[in-house]
Amino acid sequence: MLLHVKGRKSGRVYVVPVGRHVYQGQLVALAGGTWRRNLAGGADLEVTLDGHRRPAHGELIEDPREVAEIFEDLLAQIGPKRANRLGLKLNTDRAPTTTELQAALVDRNVVRLTFLDSGAAVGR
């Protein structure tokens, strides 16, 4: 999936490849680069999903506890052996606790995406 994010100051459009995940029935992307700051407080953007570019609204989730809880849920969905799909490297076969995730995800956020058109719903 690609996010087309417009810079708040520069006006430049950044095209960012991100992994897509479904959390509580809503499309989310994991955000670790500086581009994510353009979505602080929410912002409109475009999403290229399965070859189709669609208008969307992105909400940057910055609360460390909430970010850790989302990662924890996604990790439970895919299993600890596939943690690399979330950009995580686990040194154990068990899933990390929310507190451990919170400490490991200091520079990570989550973007909650809502499509603004009437296209098909997103699922897996």
Image: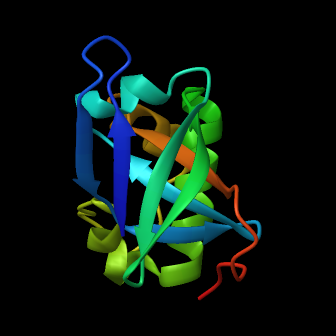
Please state the horizontal and vertical placement of residue 25, each as a whole percent of the image.
Answer: 76, 71
Q: Give the camera-side residue of 123 and 48.
A: 48
**Could you say which quadrant of the image residue 65 lies in?**
top right
Q: Give the camera-side residue of 55 and 89.
A: 55
Q: Residue furthest top?
A: 9
Quadrant containing the N terminus in the rendered view: bottom left
- For the question of whether residue 5 can be seen, the reply is yes
Q: Which residue is at 69% across, 77% downward?
A: 119
Q: Which residue is at 24% across, 50% downward?
A: 15
Q: Is residue 36 left or right of residue 41?
A: left
**Could you say which quadrant of the image residue 58 lies in?**
top right
Q: Is residue 75 left or right of residue 14?
A: right
Q: Which residue is at 65% across, 83% downward?
A: 123
Please state the horizontal and vertical placement of residue 104, each as a whole percent of the image.
Answer: 34, 39
Please state the horizontal and vertical placement of residue 124, each as a whole percent of the image.
Answer: 59, 88
Q: How many marks?
A: 0
**Could you say which quadrant of the image residue 42 lies in?**
top right
Q: Is residue 5 left or right of residue 61?
A: left
Please state the horizontal and vertical placement of residue 103, each as a whole percent of the image.
Answer: 40, 32
- For the question of whether residue 98 can be seen, the reply is no
Residue 79, relative to residue 96: is it above or below? Answer: below
Residue 63, relative to residue 17: is it above or below? Answer: above
Q: Which residue is at 32% across, 24% downward?
A: 7
What colour scheme has been applied to the protein in the rendered image?
rainbow
Q: Is residue 51 left or right of residue 54?
A: left
